[in-house]
Amino acid sequence: MGVRETEVAGKTLVISETEDVYDPATGRALTGSWLWDSSILLSEWLTRLDFDFRGKTVLELGAGGTGLPGLTAAMLGASRVILTDVEPLLGGLKGNVEANGLGDRVEVCEVVWGSDEIPSQLSEVGGVDWWC
């Protein structure tokens, strides 16, 4: 895997893909380790959307290790973005947030699908303006 760059709102986002990450419970490779074409398409669509992200809260569910759509929303002016996925992928997400200097408005939060536990970061949000 490697580093990919994509243009968003006249700025370059640097996205690092990680080597395959495995689910500790099952031993299966998690598909969120790399940047999917669908994430690139969604990010491009967000830049063309007639929606003002400035001052908005955005939640990306299942951001994988890259978080490109959520990072795109931050680049477009969202004041708070929460990127979610399972623990083995959070390191990649945090690295991409830091590499793009978006730590002041982008948070990373573990969400396990099927769990009854709601992370405090999500229960304290108070509302989401956009989700992807």
Image (tube, rainbow, N blue to C red):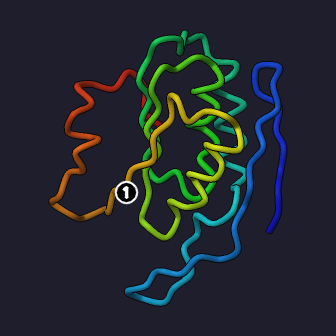
Compared to 41, does 63 lie above or below? below
Residue 72 is situated, as x and y percent measured from the top left of the image, at 64, 31
Q: Is residue 28 left or right of residue 19?
A: left
Relative placement, left or right, of 64 versus 59 is: right
Residue farthest along the left direction in this orientation:
116
Going by the numbered disc 1, the residue's amino acid type is: Glu
Q: Is residue 93 left or right of residue 126?
A: right
Which quadrant is the N terminus positioned in? bottom right
| Residue 57, placed above or below residue 13 | above
Residue 73 place in picture, x, y as percent? 58, 27
Picture coordinates of residue 99, whole percent (x, y): 71, 44
Q: Residue furthest bottom?
A: 27
Position of residue 33 in the picture relative to residue 40 (left or right): left
Q: Quadrant of residue 29?
A: bottom right
Please tell me in which quadrant of the rendered image residue 5 appears.
top right
* Residue drawn at the location 69% of the way across and 55% of the way down: 36
Residue occupying the point 43% across, 47% down: 61
Q: Which residue is mark 1?
A: 110
The local secondary structure at tag 1 comes to: strand
Front residue of this view, candidates 45 and 66: 66
